[in-house]
Amino acid sequence: MDIGFIGLGRMGRHMAANLVKAGHRVRVWNRSPDAAKGIGGAEPVATAAEAFRGEAAITMLADDAALRAVIVEGGLLDAPERPGMHIGMSTISVGLAQDLAAIHGRAGVPYVSAPVFGPPKAAEAGALNVVAAGDAAAIAKAQPLFEAMGSKTWEFGPEPHRANAVKLAGNFMLLAAIEAMGEAKALVEGHGVDGNAALELYTSTLFACPVYKNYGGTIMSGRYEPPGFTVRLGAKDMRLALAAGESAGVPMPLGSVVRDSFIESISHGDGDKDIAAASLVAARRSGQT
Amino acid sequence: MDIGFIGLGRMGRHMAANLVKAGHRVRVWNRSPDAAKGIGGAEPVATAAEAFRGEAAITMLADDAALRAVIVEGGLLDAPERPGMHIGMSTISVGLAQDLAAIHGRAGVPYVSAPVFGPPKAAEAGALNVVAAGDAAAIAKAQPLFEAMGSKTWEFGPEPHRANAVKLAGNFMLLAAIEAMGEAKALVEGHGVDGNAALELYTSTLFACPVYKNYGGTIMSGRYEPPGFTVRLGAKDMRLALAAGESAGVPMPLGSVVRDSFIESISHGDGDKDIAAASLVAARRSGQT
Amino acid sequence: MDIGFIGLGRMGRHMAANLVKAGHRVRVWNRSPDAAKGIGGAEPVATAAEAFRGEAAITMLADDAALRAVIVEGGLLDAPERPGMHIGMSTISVGLAQDLAAIHGRAGVPYVSAPVFGPPKAAEAGALNVVAAGDAAAIAKAQPLFEAMGSKTWEFGPEPHRANAVKLAGNFMLLAAIEAMGEAKALVEGHGVDGNAALELYTSTLFACPVYKNYGGTIMSGRYEPPGFTVRLGAKDMRLALAAGESAGVPMPLGSVVRDSFIESISHGDGDKDIAAASLVAARRSGQT
Amino acid sequence: MDIGFIGLGRMGRHMAANLVKAGHRVRVWNRSPDAAKGIGGAEPVATAAEAFRGEAAITMLADDAALRAVIVEGGLLDAPERPGMHIGMSTISVGLAQDLAAIHGRAGVPYVSAPVFGPPKAAEAGALNVVAAGDAAAIAKAQPLFEAMGSKTWEFGPEPHRANAVKLAGNFMLLAAIEAMGEAKALVEGHGVDGNAALELYTSTLFACPVYKNYGGTIMSGRYEPPGFTVRLGAKDMRLALAAGESAGVPMPLGSVVRDSFIESISHGDGDKDIAAASLVAARRSGQT
């Protein structure tokens, strides 16, 4: 397929490369143009508009603001040449996804939300979990692209914003797991136990799954830099999840605790460390550090 | 070894049976005596005192009150004949474990705390995770018993109550996972998503581990009866974990949210259902049910 | 003074009327023009721009969106004729106040934030508490206006958004008091006590002050309609307070609980009732209703 | 009347003295006997049993443990000479009050719960608010005593523990007010506002009542020693309030936040300071201190 790919950060560059490998023609654009050069076989273009055309345009931008700036305020939906569909793969708010669905509807461009689960390594390996929602025919057409980037596509129906709700709820669960490990560690250490030994037990047995093993492993190592995903970005995702809850009338008290801990983590200088560093808040609250 | 086993509930009966299978001589006692009959090869005795002797006595009673009543108030530590060691495997408070360590010390009976992780099925299969703390020599002697009952022993040093802290912290993490799934499900359903489909995604990928798969599976099935472990018992364990936190100066705000949700679950009639039923609180708060 | 007054809702109409009574010339404008007619002695004008001029323009609009729409997007700061100062008296976000300070700075129009504490009755009586921040000279000039509308002016320095932080923090305290009364009532009723009798005790003694007496009185009456100030608006203010906390790195766990309760209240159909109705959440959580 | 008074701490000594002033004959006993000497006109007795007789015996002991030790474990209800009624004025748990009602019922001694609101100064001035529950005839007989000690008696029906629920709910509200002021102060200071100036505003207007003025005043002064009532005792009362909630099926999320903040305050060395010091937690969480 003839694809435009916008946003070549730590995830996007791998996703675009995998599309090239799968035989698609991929025009790539990034706000800072250097990022577009290193993707062998992809065709750097000079403007976002040149990427936002072809059979499908994929966006993998940092956040709501970036997506709004490039697509909406950039006027790409009013451009003479527009893509056969727009696949939004960024982690954005449910509210923006709803706005995009409406705007694209008026512009006659099918909009599919398809955020992903998985770290940069999974993006590199083409092993992401793709969470898709939107027009069924559009999703079907996009399936070869999803297969190039991910190991499995999970569909959640015709309204694009549903995929974003699923993504944000998953990230909330991940962040809550970090807080839980932090509190559990502080609890056992308060009773003289080596917290790492306890985490080793938990993450080898009841909680032997990627989220706990990965972030538990980071906690056990005590090395929070360089970050995989920062506390500050975790706080942003928690904010988006809580806003999605509020707009649907869903109180999320566990989410509120996570939010407060992440703010506290940032206020103590850990905003740019790995999200697992938010687990340190519990020890500080307990006067252990 | 010559062992006494006190407490033949849903876990204890399987643990005692596995000790018999491993070739140990096992005297068994239970408050309601019928439970003691069905364990082939074990020797029912008429009083707790007759079980509380031999090379080791194991207790697997329901809670603090039962253990206090049988052992402490029952005066077993003042009896003429006493066991070579007492292995307490119940999930009890850190405070009681500390009291028991002191009382046993005065009585000259080594006390080992060895609570376990695992459901009745794991007890039946001899596949529990044993969390042990206490005198190292006593733990070494007990190791053949732990091997008969569990697949792995995790040691946490000389102070028995440490094992209880580790057990309670693990149960807290488990209960927090149920609350997290409940809030995540309510969030996505508030946006029109089939919550079960989202849970299927989470528990197959990021959260593909026993706690999430088991309790997530129960939530997806919607069948909370018969219970594995009840909401009421979950509330009790959360109370013990929070008390352990308080005594060590550890605030546990995530734990506080879990506590409040479990109280709410009981107040709405779900106290005797499976702990996974506590996930229903989030939907009711959201006005979805 | 020659004043323009924009926003003639339940508070604004009284404030404008008091300015007239104090001898000022007051041009008034409201989005729905009928509201502008009933203020004797004031001069209705046809456009917001005609009100946004003179020695001072006062805005008392519903929320951030209304203020942004009328002033910023309405282009009033680029109009040829502009006021000697703009006094923003609405309860708005700290973020918008910061934006307004910057925008007015560029336009050369002094901006004073002056939100108020007090119900419509206090507005009618000219007995509001005015919370002012901004350029000291501008506040000094505005003082006769504040005296016409309020009983006391509280100054918080040169940065306008500080007044908004003080206002939002006060509203947070008010909302937390409602949640506290709700939980206290549920607690005592859970033990067979007449909750109203307990509230009567609290609000006559330890808590004999306007917030507790007014909202406690509403709770005791059980009449939540017509609302003074709605649960939905309370939820909005709580959202603004939490956002102000987040932007300053301040976790507000008590505020998070209030937020969750207000969402729950709205989800159970009480969004348009008096904020005191949020106290009902505690009873429902407890299975009492 | 002929009265025994047990417990002559900071509150009890004034209460006993006021009973003497009102013309009653008062036998006094305290665990450390020196305290009993300074109350002019009262008759120190050598044992608690000698105080626990006469027309009424009043207890004003520190906590559940002290009351259990002196009355229940001390066997005073089995003594040959017993009082016409027992008036328990300590702040104790709802659970102990229920136990005491049962035990006294079996012993044939009417039990009235009558905890009080008010600081030592109010005790000295005979201006306490007495919260009474129990047998109506017994309360009627006790009324002259209450009038000697307090300015008003608030009755809550025949079950003694109800008075304790009302007392604990009131203390919860007080503790929540401190947390609210702490968060509000941190919020405004995060935006450059002098927090004391904001507290001055709140406590002079919306919140001009004893709890906010007293504890707000302490916060403004920054002097948390000597303590009126310590953080540690506040934590204890919060624990009792939450336990009372749990036993009645009442989740108290605001109370849970208060609990966590008080634990955090103690863990940072403020346990023996005035409860208003718990407000410092919010600033530390925010990285302001």
Image (cartoon, coloured by chain):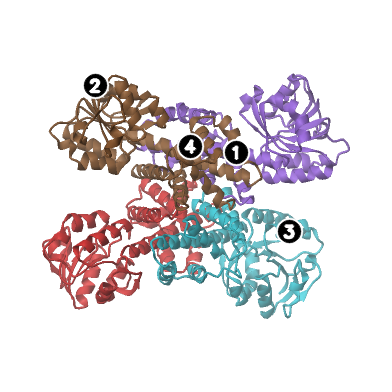
Chain colours: A cyan, B red, C purple, D brown
The front one of A21 and C55 is: C55
In space, the residues marked 4 and 3 are separated at their CA atoms by 47 Å
**Amino acid found under the numbered disc labelled 3:** Gly
The kind of residue on which mark 2 rests is Met
Report if residue D282 is visible in the image. yes
Quarter placement of the C terminus of chain C: top left
Q: Residue at x 38, y 54 (%)?
A: B247
Q: Position of residue D125 (x, y in %)?
A: 40, 25
Badges 4 and 3, same chain: no
- Residue C228 percent across, percent down from the top left: 58, 30
Q: Nearer the viewer, residue C48 or A135?
A: C48
From the viewer's perspective, is residue C2 above or below residue B111? above
In the rendered image, the vertical position of residue A124 relative to residue C103, given as above or below = below
Q: Which disc, if any, is residue C101? A: none
Res. D205 visible in picture:
no
Amino acid type at circle 1 is: Asn
Distance between mark 3 and mark 2 Cα atoms: 91 Å
**Label 2 secondary element:** loop
Mark 2 and mark 4: Cα distance apart in space: 44 Å
Secondary structure found at label 4? helix
**Residue type of the residue flagged with mark 4:** Ser
Q: Which residue is mark 1?
A: D196
